[in-house]
Image (spheres, grey):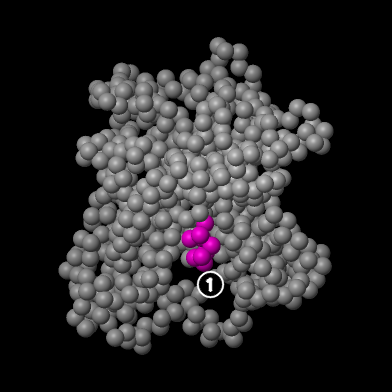
Amino acid sequence: MATQTLHTPHPTAAVRSNRRPVRRAPRSRKWSLPKSPGGWVILALCIIGTFGMLVPVYVIVTTALSGSHGAPNFFLAFPDAPSLDAFKGAWTKLHGSLINSLQITVPAAIISCLLGSLNGYVLSKFPFKGSTTLFTVLLVGMFIPFQAVIIPVFQFLNMLHLQGTIVGLIIVHIIYGIPITTLIFRNYYEAIPNAIVEAAAIDGAGIWTTFTKVMLPLSVPGFVVAGIFQCTNIWNDFLFGFILASPAAWPATVTLNNLIGTTTVDYPELMAGAILVALPTVLLYLVLGRFFVQGLTAGAVK
Amino acid sequence: MTTSAAPPQALPPVRPPRPAKARKKIAHNVRTSRRAAWIFAPSLLASFIFVYVFIGITAYISLSNWKIGTSPDLSLRTPLGGTYSEIVKEQRFQADIRNVVVFTVLFLLLAILGGLVAALFIHHVSMGKSFFRTVFLLPYALSFIVTGVAWRWIFSPSTGVNEILRAIGIQNPPGWTTDTTILGALNNPNGTDFLKIQFGIPVALLPIIFAAAWQLVGFAMAMYLAGLASIPEEHLEAASVDGASTWQRLRYIVLPQLWPSTITCFVLLLHVALKIFDLVVAMSGSGPGFVTDVPGIYIYNYLASRYDKASAMSIILLLLTLAVVVPYLVRGYRRERKA
């Protein structure tokens, strides 16, 4: 199907390899001891930095484990009798909101990724007059402070009787997710040779058939990148959930924030709650970290 | 160390080979192209309404008499813009502007410099590169609320870092987010002035700045690592052969090539800083005397009672953001047209 001869798939790589023999960049997974004193210094500083970065994570975990005995006297001390008691309390208060968050995140991420891939497909493979301008106009939506639209959004959802509901939040997340997913997919599809689309067109496939039969099967990595990006963003959202959701539809971040009482704070329970809320995105990040980083760099307009 | 023959900046300009005519038009006729445009239309329309029209509505509300959300009043306020002149006189508004400026400047400095240093070290570390990268970027995957509650605990006046400070002999450690001290105050308002707040760096903001920088330093690091990976090895080798020191290579080859990463970090982090809300809510809220109040919280508080004031603040926040983002997007757009 793909007549690769029409178009060199990766012109950049080809040009570079003609110029001079490519020296392979050192692989990041290679482990070797530092060879110079400077190398040891760098390694030592990296390790110190790592400990520094992990202090808050450590504090969250140890405080959560201190359970019903209350937090340890010194904040960096490990609890004498670690227990999972705090998690029970946190789970009772949070599990409903965690399910809400899941119900909001999954459909909103899937639909905004689908829309983004369609848009990215059109913008990269069928640029029309003014498409770059319209794309830039669309991208502004990625950067606006959502406070500047929150009143109209609230009134709009009110009009549709969706204010406070999960469906309302899904709609809002889909619409404000379109610019970033479009950007990610457009950059992703730019790297797919035009020859593939041309070949499909010669074989008589229309725009839709080319998309569903040719582009979508090639889009799995793009969907993983955009999907992780959207899932993390939507799961971690606070503003929309805080303002637009009724208590029954509160996402986990809002309920977690409400665990901070006005006078006293049950820190072990709060930290246990924080772990429950953080766990899904952290697991996603640890398992699919490579794609996560790609989403970040793709999200940066070049 | 500038004894060597050719100074490194005399190297030929670095220009990655351009992809040969990347954006070739595929559409075989105008009809296909038009049909394709229709696929894009619904998303564009939705974004147009939810972004541009809604911003227009917010701007209109900021000029109107609409105060309580449930009783719409779309008559224009006289004098026009009266809401804006009302809020700029407020102590709270002035504190918010001071706070967001101080927060943005210090946070950007910390996060960008920290990210650059971390990236330089992690790029050159001989083992565990991906491990270090994973750890530094981990906070970015967390919600501001999650990290906010942890930092709230660490910087609470009675526990956390203050225990360490007391242990090393500091009798009266700062109250952190509850501290009303303003460092380096530039003025001393006497109550009758237009300015009702002290300009300076509120101590209470420091923990929030630190927490935000901790959370986003990994983002800057990831941007810089991507930038570092794209610097051709040959340039650095050539410079070494010419006798350039490590510092010279950094100064004349690496840093100039990281400039695009710096711009990206600057813009993306700046727009995070301006609209910061969740982290402050979780760590401190408005604070005593609005010492940690930010526009995001101001807007939220007035959503209940004063639509006009909330809208006016939103528009000011939006204009601040657009002042940076629009030039950035236009620059990207121009490059796109040239390519």
Above or below, A64 against B297 in this view is: below
Q: What secondary structure is marked by label 1? A: loop
Task: Give residue A29's quadrant in the image.
Answer: bottom right
Residue B323 x/y as whole percent:
45, 42
Residue A26 appears in the figure = yes
Chain part drawn in magenta: A282-290
Which quadrant, please, contains the N terminus of chain A? bottom left
Residue A283 forms part of the magenta stretch: yes
- In the image shown, does A112 or B146 lie closer to the viewer? B146
Q: Position of residue A87 (x, y in %)?
A: 53, 46
Q: Residue at x 70, y 46 (%)?
A: A80
Residue bearing the label numbered 1: B16
Which residue is the extreme one toward the left?
A: B31
**Can residue B325 be seen from the camera position used here?**
no
Q: Amino acid at mark 1?
A: Pro
* Whether residue B299 is situated above or below residue B24 in the rendered picture: above
Q: Is residue B82 left or right of residue B26?
A: right
**Which residue is at 34% across, 37% downward?**
A246
The residue shown at (32%, 22%) is B67
Residue in front for this viewpoint, B80 or B296 = B296
Q: Is residue B143 magenta?
A: no
